[in-house]
Amino acid sequence: MSDDTRSDLYAELASTGPYGVRPGHALITMVEPHPGHEYAYNRWYEDDHYYAGAMAMPWMFAGRRWVATRDLQLLRSPEKSAVAQPVTAGCYLSVYWITEGRYDDHMRWTVAINRRLNRDARVYRDRTHVFTAFQDHAATVYRDGAAGPRDVHALDHPYAGLVLEVIDTDTPEQCAGLLEWLRARHLPARLAGSPAALVTVFRPTPLPGDRMTYVKQVEGVGTRLTLLWFLERDPQECWEEHFTGLDTEIAASGPGRRVELIAPFVPTVPGTDTHVSALR
C-alpha cells in the first residue's frame, strides 16, 4: 500500500471556498444498538467511529453525543410517532456541525470514507438508524439575546441536556409558515424563563444516491423541521413544566402541523460506559 497522502492537494483545497465557523449544516443521527450489543456499540462509537467516521472529516468542526436512559425514553411523545417505532427506539443521538457552504464537499468525503470503513470492517453492524439526516440550518433563537454561548458553541458548551423535536407539515407552504411562527412567536415565548438557552432549527436535505445501504433516504424534505433545545438542567427535572403540552400547542397553531417526536437526552461522558447499564 502506498503511503502517498497527496498532500499537495490539501494546500490547493484550503485556498478556496467558504471557511467560516457558522453551523450552516448538521448531521443529526439517532441510533438504536441491537439488544445485547449496547456496550460493544458504545465502545466502537466512542473509541473509533466518532473520530474516524465524523470528526476527522473535512468541514465537520464540532460534535457531541447524547444518550437517553430508559427513564428519559419513557418521557417521549407521541406514542405513535412517524419518526421512531416504537417511540422509545433510538437511545443514542449524535449531532455534528458542518461549515456553511461545505455540504457537498463534506458529503463527497463522507460517502468515500464510509466505503473505506466498511471495506476495512470498521462499521458496527448490530445497530439500527432510527433517524439519520443531514440538515440545513434554518434559524437559531436565543433565550438571553446576545448574552451567552452562540449556536456555534452549542456542541462544546457543557449543556446538561438536549431535547430533539421533529415537526411535520402537509405542504412546503405550511412548513414555511411554521418556521416563521416558531422563529417570531413560539420559541421566544417558550424560551423566556426556561432552562433552555437556545433552540436551533434545521430542514432535512436528501442523502446522495450512493449513501450506505443501511441508512434510509431522508423523509420529510420540504415539509419537516428538526429542533434542538439545549438545556442548562437535566431534562427530567424540568420536563413536566416546560415540555409537556408542546404537541398540542403546535397542532393548535395552524393547519397540517404535528409533532412527530419530542425526545430528551443527556450528554454522554466520552471514553466511558456511563449510562449504558440504564438503557433497558
Image: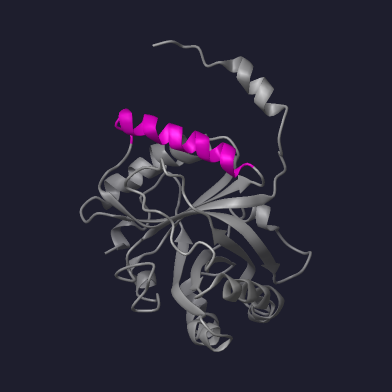
Q: Position of residue 118 (x, y in %)?
A: 33, 34
User: Quadrant location of residue 21?
Assistant: top right
Image point 40% across, 75% down: which residue? Answer: 76
Q: Is 110 contained in the magenta span?
A: yes
User: Considering the image in quadrants, where does the N terminus appear?
Assistant: top left
Q: Position of residue 55 (x, y in %)?
A: 52, 39
Q: Position of residue 79 (x, y in %)?
A: 34, 79
User: Quadrant location of residue 81?
Assistant: bottom left
Span shown in magenta? 102-122
In the image, residue 111 above or below residue 42:
above
The rendered magenta stretch, by its main secondary structure, is classed as helix
Image point 68% across, 79% down: which residue? Answer: 192
User: Quadrant location of residue 19?
Assistant: top right
Q: Is residue 107 left or right of residue 100?
A: left
Image point 28% across, 52% down: which residue? Answer: 38
Image point 62% across, 56% down: which residue? Answer: 154
Colouring of the image: one colour
Could one spot residue 244 in this view of the protein?
Answer: no
Q: Is residue 234 left or right of residue 274?
A: right
Q: Is 1 contained in the magenta span?
A: no
Q: Position of residue 156 (x, y in %)?
A: 60, 51
Q: Nearer the viewer, residue 117 or 149?
A: 117
